[in-house]
Image: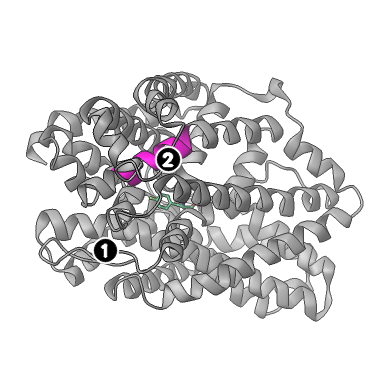
Amino acid sequence: MATSSSTQPRDTWGSKLGFVMAAAGSAVGLGNIWKFPYTAGESGGGAFVLIYLMFVLFIGFSVMLTEFAVGRKTGLSAVGAFKSTDRRWAFTGVIGVLSGLLIMGFYPVVGGWALAYIFKVGGGLLSTPEAIGDSFGGFISDPVQPLMWMGVYLMLNIVIVMRGISGGIEKAGKVLMPLLFVILITVAVYGMTLPGAMAGVEFLFKPDFSKVDSNVVLAALGQAFFSLSLGMGCMMTYGSYLKKKENLVQTTGMVTAMDTGVAILAGVAMFPAMFAFGMAPSAGPGLVFVVVPQLFAEMGGLIGLLLALLFFIGLTVAALTSSVSLLEVVVSYLIDEKGMKRSRAVISASVVMATLCVFASLSLGGVGPTLFGTGAFDIFDLLTDKIFLAVGGMLVCIFAGWRLSRSELEKEITNDGKVSFPLFGLWYNLVKYVIPVAIAIVAFMGIKSGFDSGKGEIMLVGIGIIALAGVFSKKL
Ligand code: PFF
């Protein structure tokens, strides 16, 4: 990604493919390969997947197009984009920055696991398949080891964002993302040949609506936002670097399709194998770190080892291309709004993120403070995924639908009439009326049912923070 501060002329993306790959790089990450499979597993499978796909199609696509349009129209990153139109809306950008900080309060912990697994696989993890599950449990609850890996992972982010994003990481992504895709397909095909695998395919695609409650619906909405990098101004910032002649609708379609394709593929790679191995689909956050090594161990030989290594290298790079975009949202805020130099902004943001990550990582071993009985890792995840991103997406839609004019938006999205978008009217009405109402209902119901599982209180705290940001918006 090109980088600039407010004092320099704004860079634009060198090529259309470069932009699509960078936006897809932000979207495709741990959300697809780590979070989607285990959330689907915990949420009952097929029905969750179907609701998720509906949300991607009707809400995710429209919100992404809105973020690209607002970003390109204003040419500014999250906070500035709102502020330049109406000061009172600045808080929406600030919530985005806060989401970036909080997601980076646990994302590098998992990124560190992925990095560690390259070395664990290389060090002979696959030779004792029966110990893979315990080894993961022991690893993440250890107080020291995961912290070291998190530190190394965060350092990689710091180096990349310091140098501007368009360097090596983009090149690594261009090679390793397609490779990861190919490995996922290989794993999926291999997994399906195992005895008993079809039960996994059925679990993933045959909806059983008796397993759906409001919590599952909110989880599907949160997953759609998280996976597509929406609701926190990230795609808005990316859009601000986009050339006026690019086709926003087509770009949105390509990024959404790639992101969703990888998530589904990750599901198909994991569930058949899980069922074949007799593991419970609700295995939780360890899923990818337990199932995938086990599958490669089963495959055996040098091929199994090589594919496992490439898988975790690919996963680490996919995570990196996402987390640098998260860090960049916070950094560009500090540069544009607080007048910091890039190096200082990167260091300040990273110190806060590293501190949050220490709490998040320790909480998995049962160490550290809790809020309403929930540890730091889960708090950061719950607040962002279930509240901030969805509410952020809702506010972006309200802003575009009610604060900007229909003709301004039409001009931006159709490049002054040069690109045809026959569904403009449908998109506009979705953004102005349907999506804000739909998100409000899903969030309200989800919070209400969250109280049964002891999570409602934390979600309410999230709503409280948003309300406070709104009240103090003039000071932001
Ligand atoms: N979309 C990323 C993933 O699926 O891993 C996570 C993410 C990146 C969320 C950037 C939000 C964001 F702004």
Q: Which residue is mark 2?
A: 420
The magenta stretch is 59-69
Distance between the Cα atoms at labels 2 and 1? 46 Å
- Mark 2 or 1: in front is 2
Q: Residues within 10 Å of mark 1 (few under 14, many from 20)?
A: few
Residue found 51% across the figure and 31% down from its top: 58
Tag 1's secondary structure? helix
Q: Residues within 10 Å of mark 2 (few under 14, many from 20)?
A: few
Which quadrant is home to the N terminus? bottom left
| Residue 468 is covered by the magenta coloring | no
Residue 180 rendering spot, x and y as whole percentages: 63, 66
Residue found 68% across the figure and 52% down from its top: 265
Q: Which residue is mark 1?
A: 351
**Sequence-first tag of 2 and 1:** 1
Residue found 50% across the figure and 33% down from its top: 221
Three-letter amino acid code at the position of disc 1? Val
- Does residue 97 appear anywhere in the picture? no
